[in-house]
Image (cartoon, rainbow, N blue to C red):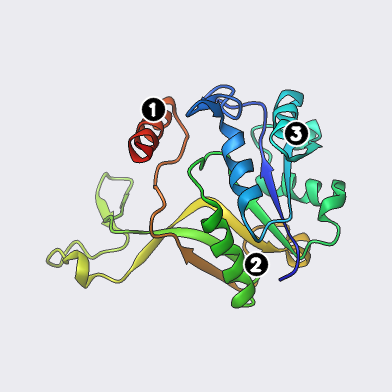
Amino acid sequence: MKRAVAIIPARGGSKGIPGKNLKPFLGEPLIAHAIRAALAAETVSDVVVSSDDPGILDVAARYGAIGVLRPAEIAGDEASSEAALLHAVEACRACEDAETIVFLQCTSPLTTPDEIDLVVRTRDRLAADTAFSVVEVHAFLWEIASDGTGIGVNHDASKPRQRRQDRPEQFRETGAIYALRKSGFIEAGQRFFGKSVPVVLSDATEIDLDTPRDWKVLEAYASAFEG
């Protein structure tokens, strides 16, 4: 398998949870969990952290990652993760001969090295352009029309409610792990291009760290699980 480099975007600003990337999660900075998982993955050769915050880059270096200082113009609230990835690919020498870019999110601190390896190896095995982590979901989704009426998205509300086992399998993108063919990603400028394959993570949690409540719930879950 050719070289894969993990890139972790980590801005200094955060409205939902101020300073979240350096906030202690289970006793260590949030970003440390993503770095450690990536460094322990067999498929990953180097770990790069892209940030506009020198404090985050200092912590990243302490945990063994390569830091890339992100320009202010791609570090605001409206800046995309893809912009940070593309800049890091261009700015970091470790990415020069990488065939795969592994995009990881700090907000999934329970991501494991085995999960990273599964996504990277699946992309390679299926000759995909993008492989990404998903979890199976069983929710009945609704849209709300302008008059307040509910419209079934993945079910027909006019028919008897289906049993879970009778419904087609459906999956939610976790946002935690993406393995991207580097050359195609550079050309497309976005994470989904060409052949994209979902990779089911059977034991992954479905909690995103967007609010202080999410933080408390996930940390409690992780503490109970580890105990």
Label for residue 61? Answer: 3
Label for residue 216? Answer: 1
Please provide percent x and percent y for residue 88: 79, 46
Q: Secondary structure at mark 2?
A: loop
For residue 221, which quarter of the picture?
A: top left
Q: Is residue 219 left or right of residue 67?
A: left
Circle nearer the N terminus (1, 3): 3
Circle nearer the N terminus (3, 2): 3
Q: Secondary structure at mark 1?
A: helix
Q: Is residue 189 left or right of residue 17?
A: right
Determine whether 59 is above or below 187 in the image: above
- Alpha carbon of mark 2 to alpha carbon of mark 1: how far? 35 Å
Residue mark closest to the camera, 1 vs 3: 3
Name the residue nearer the viewer: 91 or 139: 91
- Alpha carbon of mark 3 to alpha carbon of mark 2: how far? 32 Å
Determine whether 126 is above or below 205 in the image: below
Q: Is residue 82 left or right of residue 114?
A: right
Residue found at x 30% / y 71%: 168
Label for residue 193? Answer: 2
Please provide percent x and percent y for residue 167: 25, 70
